[in-house]
Image: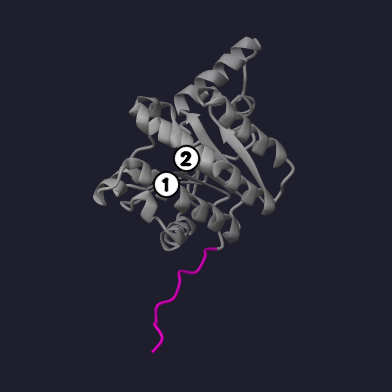
Amino acid sequence: MKSSKTALPLPEKLPRHIAFIMDGNGRWAKKRLLPRKAGHRAGVKVMRNIVDECFTLGIPYVTVYAFSTENHNRPQEEIDALFALLKEYFSEFFDDLMKKNIRVLTIGDLSYFPNDLQEDIRTAVLKSAQNTRGTFSIALNYGGRDDILQAVNQAVKGGQTVTTEEFQKFLYTADLPDPDAIVRTGGEKRISNFLLYQCAYSELFFTDTLWPDFDKKELLRIISEYGARDRRYGKVKS
């Protein structure tokens, strides 16, 4: 007997830009008596699947929060493991994105990372610059406050008073539309210094699911809820 359950229908209104705060890798590993790096490794696999699913659904911009400026405060052993994981997966993942005609961007200050990793990242960005199917952005050594400060300093250095539109050109996200939806996994209900300027009118979604357990079903549930929300941007509903 076939199940009567059906998949949630996709709404007519998809987010143009969806961003993910991928939280819960460490807790996922702890629950399984595994080292934290095992959780990060599992999280990378889920990231690849979810990013691919977003582009398959027709969402043209996808951003993930991979390494924040506050992550500097983690144990050096964990930071080194994250660097090694990025190095291991970066070339393979972005070769796959290249084949799928996806443009790669990074937001944040890459100078914190080892030189060889910086070179891998810049090569991926350069090689994919003309791709047109979608844009994948990965936030590396990124913090919303730092983003605003570096943008202000650029404007001051240029000796100019800027409008909202002009100021956005100085942000790390200058080539991206503001996120329509920000999804945070892991149960916490905060933005954690992510896209602070850009999220002024983003729809926020919080789920208790730890990132390594996040799947297509939950993604579709969130997208369906997004489609049902009435985004007024401060206007009165007519």
- Residue 191 at x, y percent in the picture: 39, 37
Left/right placement of residue 128 relative to residue 143 reads right
User: 102 and 4: which one is in front?
Assistant: 102
Chief secondary structure of the magenta portion: loop
CA gap, disc 2 to disc 1? Answer: 7 Å
Q: Residue at x 39, y 82 (%)?
A: 3
- Residue 144 at x, y percent in the picture: 46, 28
Rendered image: mark on residue 85: 2
Q: Quadrant of residue 124?
A: top right
Which stretch is magenta?
Answer: 1-11
Q: Is residue 176 magenta?
A: no
Q: Secondary structure at mark 2?
A: helix
Q: Residue at x 38, y 52 (%)?
A: 212
Left/right placement of residue 23 relative to residue 27 reads right
Query: Is residue 4 visible in the rendered structure shown here?
Result: yes
Rendered image: mark on residue 67: none
Q: Residue at x 36, y 27 (%)?
A: 76
Residue 64 higher or lower than 67, as above or below? below
Which residue has dot 1 on it?
A: 41
Residue type at mark 1 is Arg
Q: Residue furthest bottom?
A: 1
Left/right placement of residue 62 relative to residue 127 reads left
The reply to whether dot 2 and dot 1 touch (C-beta < 8 Å) is: yes
